[in-house]
Image: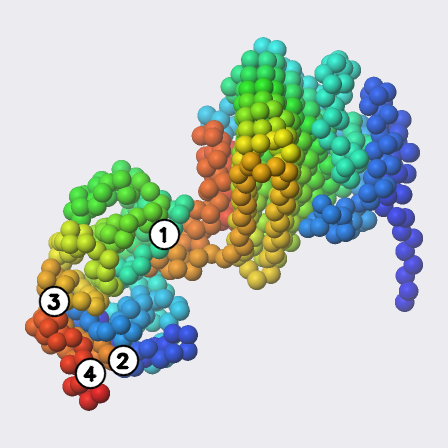
Amino acid sequence: MLVIKDLYAKVEGKDILKGINLTVNAGEVHAIMGPNGSGKSTLANVLAGHTNFEVTHGTVTFNGKDLFEMSADVRAKEGLFLSFQYPVEIPGVSMVNFLKTAVNEHRKYHNQKELSAGDFLKLMREKKAMVQIDSQLTNRSVNEGFSGGEKKKNEIFQMAMLEPKLAILDETDSGLDIDALRIVSNGVNMLKNKDNATILVTHYQRLLDYIVPDFVHVLYEGRIVKSAGKELAFELEEKGYDWIKKELGE
Amino acid sequence: MAEVLDKIPTIQRISEIHRDNLSKISDGIPAWINNLRRPALEALKRMGIPGFRTENYKYTDLTRLFENENFRRSFKPDVFDVNLSEVFNCDVPEFDTHLILVANGWYDETGNQHKSYPKGVIIKSMRKAMVENSELIEKYYGKLADAEADPLTALNTAFAQDGVFIYIPDNVHVTKPLQLINILRSEDDLYVTQRNLVIAGRNSQAKIMFCDHTLMPQQFINNNLTEFEIGEDAVIDIYSIQNQHNKTANLTGLYIRQQRGSQLVTNAISLHGGIIRNNLKVMLDGDHASARICGLALSDKNQHVDNFTFIEHLKPNCQSNQLYKNILDDSSTGGFTGRIHVAPHAVKTQAYQRNNNVLLTNAARMSTKPQLVIDNDDVKCSHGATVGRINDEALFYLQARGINEKEARLMLMFAFAHEVLAEVKVEKLRDVIDRLVNKRLRGEVSKCHSCALECIR
């Protein structure tokens, strides 16, 4: 589904990614872990198409198509979803209008008929129940005045609405209390199937108690320095990242 | 090659036009009003045509506009080959208003025939009212707009012949909005003077819309002045929709006095116009009066929109709250000056002001300036101004959900504008304005749904 080959990227002139290689197949859950500043969020943003990040080398194909040939909105419509680490508040844009536009943009892209207002509201009700988002939140402006937990739940709700093929969850666990974490994880697990894939970008092992990864990768100084099964996460939790650094001879 | 231009100074030319046409201008108007003309012209000579050096017109230089015009003046009502009430057909579904037509500054007697208004409400031509309602006119005409203090007021006072007179008696609630349509229509370039007076009695209620339109591609200068008296406990909404073409200079003055306990909302939506200058003065002249004052301007190409507000807190316990927003595209320019004066005895005053602006290009420019003069220390006042760009992170967020950049930008601009539109309390009207603004932002012709008016852009 996603094939990253020798990816280099920089932000504000500083090299952050220095040769990433990663393949994600349908049905898989990958966790990308690593210390602060290792390039985890950069990788997520580069894949989603943020223009602040400059790709200097390498290729990424998404379902066989060159990802870098697509603008951010086309990537989304092709099925790539980024759950933001810090979802933006957008005063004046209502949740309903925002989601309706997004859903219908997806449908138009796939030559499907736009949803009627009634069908849309029905879909929204279903998905709200599924991810247990407070029904009041959708009456407000996008993320405006939402608590940290509400913002993250809102990301998962949007994911449920858009049903992506590949979801990249950037530090979705940060700032969540245990209840919110459970709700968010349940949502992700419920949306998981054999045709889609998930990349969890996370600092801590905590999230992986709820969403069990098939693969764990350690990102360090812009490269994936270690890949293994889920047991790697426990090892990291126990020993910290210094152990990896030592292994690398630092 | 040297070209010698025999240019007569602007003020001299205006004086000559005034002198040469004085009998036409004065015709049918009471002597005491005609006697205001000469002093007004002298005041104009003293102050000069407003330019960058005129303190209150720093952001809007009108000297070139007046230097280069030699437009026709309509000293008599123009005769049209069509019935304007048929040409103008604002039949927005379920948006039912009392239409009042004004053509080139003249109350349109033909188009306004057979209109019925709530009991006691008087709506008629200003020049008729000057004769027929002399008691009211003598009490209120020229009392709020001071020709000695402002050059555009001086110019208006010197040339004023007609406009609309509206009188709403005490305790009368006018439920249907009054919709005053100003139409500019001429085969040649035209200079228009319009003078209105609105008197809203004690405990009256009304919503008044001013819609400014152009029907022809010619150049226009429109000097439009309205004096507005609001009685005790009256509730008045004033909406202004400026939708003219880019060869029009729309120079407006709105002078309002509020009595005790009255509530005012003003909202000026500037969609199109070459040069728009809105002077707004609100005098809070009775305890517990409140004013919510808003404006939204969308400009592109070389348009210029300048809002100048002056809120005068003269009595205790009054509240004023201003919100102005501009979205500027291309090389358009804008100005906002918000003056607040709190008089020494106007204790417990609350006066707020906010001006937020979005520049869409590097060439667009916005100048903004609060001016607060507070003469007592028992007040709550605040002001804030921002000039910024579309938020890139919000833009990316929308794009990351599959919304293309153009649509995402529109959503953000509309969201920015909507805060002002949300202040329009009449739901149907808000829908109409919402739609107009949406179309305007999309670069489509922003005319109302089924209106026959072809506003030429």
What amino acid does circle 1 point to? Glu
Answer yes or no: is residue B386 visible.
Answer: yes
| SS for dot 2 | loop
Residue A159 lies left or right of residue A228; in this view the side is: right
What amino acid does circle 3 point to? Pro
- How far apart marks 1 and 4 lie (CA) works out to 38 Å
Can you give x and y, in whole percent of width and height, for residue A198 in the image? 18, 64
For marks 1 and 2 on the same chain, the one whose residue lies earlier in the sequence:
1
- How far apart marks 3 and 1 lie (CA) works out to 30 Å
Residue B163 lies left or right of residue A153; in this view the side is: right
Are dots 2 and 4 in contact, CB under 8 Å?
A: no
Can you give x and y, in whole percent of width and height, for residue B139 in the image? 74, 18
Residue A245 disc label: 4
What amino acid does circle 2 point to? Glu
Q: Is residue B400 above or below residue B160?
A: below
Are dots 2 and 3 in contact, CB under 8 Å?
A: no
Closest to the camera, between mark 4 and mark 3, is: 4
For marks 2 and 3 on the same chain, the one whose residue lies earlier in the sequence:
3
Please check whether the numbered discs 1 and 4 fall on a single chain. Answer: yes
Q: Which residue lies under the disc numbered 1?
A: A89
Query: Where on the picture, by quarter, is residue A71?
Result: bottom left
| SS for dot 1 | loop
